[in-house]
Amino acid sequence: MQPTPPIAFSIAGSDPSGGAGIQADLKTFSALGVYGAAAITSLTAQNTREVRAIHDAPPDFVAHELDCVYEDLEVAATKVGMLSSAALIATVATRLRAHAARNVVVDPVMVAKSGAKLLRDDALEALRRELVPLASVLTPNLPEAAVLLGINEAEVLAEPERACERLHALGARAIVLKGGHAGGERSDDLVFDGARFQRLEATRTASRNTHGTGCTFSAALAALLARGNSVISAAEGAKRFVSAAIVASQDWKLGHGHGPVHHFHALWREGTN
């Protein structure tokens, strides 16, 4: 008999086109050998080109979703993604504290790949105050880090170590500052665990298929934490997973915009239709 797999829990929005959000998270959990649970915070009408509409779940319903999972399943790690409103952020933060959630990975989702805003302006302070201090790992990209710190993106790019230290001071126990928005030939990330820095190096892959890379990275990080990896080791593994997923999908033609990455690149046989 197979031993019970570790459990990772995604709290995020739904992407009906399958490349980002809950759908990407569950694919990532499965690809990395972790059982996935999920609570939907928002329904989005989106595809590879645009986000057409957003419909938030009522906060009290989201609270029930979280309670049902935490009361029944032994959750080893939680990934928090799209929370569009202050009310949803407060609700999720309250339930995370009530259930003493472990290994909480917070991906501060603000803008979709298409450019659509996914975080309301009045929710930013709630994100800083309520959710960031609960993060075992915070995973902002460069624009998100700049918004959280109230500075220009150029300042984050110029002094990434200082930006990580300032994000850590907001209460998150570790930071992964993602460098994909920096441009150039490289796409390096920076990890700060409160004591030391670790650079995650990668050569940039020229591909239009990058929809859901942020969701996939944070989900992979949560999955590897659920499997017992350290923050540094989990971040390194998540970086390798996402980089390989981008490479494997670069010739795909799924949709007419930013296509998805190949979450099952290590599992699908070559030539599978």
Image: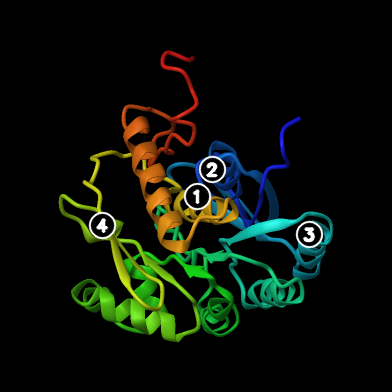
Q: CA distance from mark 4 to mark 1?
A: 17 Å
Cβ atoms under marks 2 and 4 closer than 8 Å: no
Label 3 sits on residue: 65
Q: CA distance from mark 1 to mark 2?
A: 6 Å
Image coordinates of residue 211 in percent, x first then y, are 42, 45
Image coordinates of residue 141 in percent, x first then y, are 36, 64
The residue at 38%/53% (across/down) is 236
Residue 28 tag number: 2
Which badge, 1 or 3, comes first in the chain's sequence? Answer: 3
Which badge, 3 or 4, comes first in the chain's sequence? Answer: 3
From the viewer's perspective, is residue 142 above or below residue 127?
above
- In terms of image quadrants, where is residue 105? bottom right
Label 1 sits on residue: 220
Element type at mark 1: helix
Q: CA distance from mark 2 to mark 4?
A: 21 Å
Quarter of the picture containing the N terminus is: top right
Amino acid on which disc 2 is placed = Thr
Res 41 visible: no
Amino acid on which disc 3 is placed = Glu
Amino acid on which disc 1 is placed = Ala
Which badge, 4 or 1, comes first in the chain's sequence? Answer: 4
* Colour style of the rendered protein structure: rainbow
Amino acid on which disc 4 is placed = Asp
Asked whether 57 or 138 is in front, the reply is 138
- In terms of image quadrants, where is residue 266? top left
